[in-house]
Amino acid sequence: MARSNQSNSIALSEINDQFFTEVSPEQAAVVEGGLRVQLLQLRCLEAGGGSDQVFAEFNGVRSGFGRTQFMRRNFVANFTEAGGSGSSVRVRLRDASNGNASLGSFRVSSTVKNSRTQVISGNGSRYEVTFNAPF
C-alpha cells in the first residue's frame, strides 16, 4: 500500500511540473490585467491660451477622480496618475478649461521599468510627460 501512495505522489509532482510554471512579476501583471502606465511628472513647455487645467486619460478613461492640475508655461508638476489595461495603453492629456480639448497623446505597448519622457502637443500646448510602465 505504501508503494501505491509513493507512485501517486510521483505522478502528482509530474503533473504539477506540466501545469505550473514560474513567471516574472511583469508577466503576472499582464496576465492579471495588462499593462499599467504611471505618469510621474508633467512639464509645461507651452500652454495654449496661457494656462491649462490638465487631466489624464488612459485608454479613454479619465483618471484622478475629476481632479485637474493647473499648468502654465515652465510649470512642473508631480503627476501621480496611473491607469490602463491590456497589451497597449493610450495616454492622453486634456484641458478641462477648454472643453476637454486634447493636449496630445502617446501609446505605451511594453513595460518601461526606468522612467521615460515623451513630448506631446495639441491645442497650442506642449508638454514633457515623464512616465513608467513597470508592469
Image (cartoon, rainbow, N blue to C red):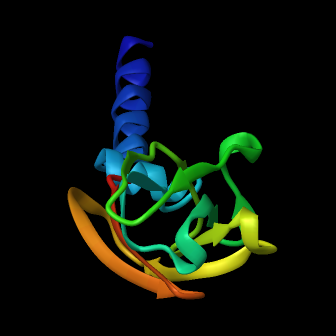
x, y percent for residue 21? 34, 49
Up the image or down, 45 lies above or below 36; here it is below
Q: 20 and 59: which one is in front?
A: 59
Residue 22 at least partly seen: no
Q: 115 and 66: which one is in front?
A: 66
State the residue at coordinates (43%, 45%).
Answer: 15
Up the image or down, 42 lies above or below 95; here it is above
Placement of the N terminus among the 4 image quadrants: top left
Left or right for 33, reference 126: right
Up the image or down, 107 lies above or below 51; here it is below
Q: 117 and 35: which one is in front?
A: 117
State the residue at coordinates (48%, 62%).
Answer: 35
State the residue at coordinates (56%, 51%).
Answer: 70
Residue 61, by quadrant, is bottom right
Q: Residue furthest left?
A: 114
x, y percent for residue 55? 63, 58
Left or right for 74, reference 64: left
x, y percent for residue 134? 32, 52
* Mark count: 0
State the residue at coordinates (33%, 33%).
Answer: 10
Q: Residue furthest top?
A: 2
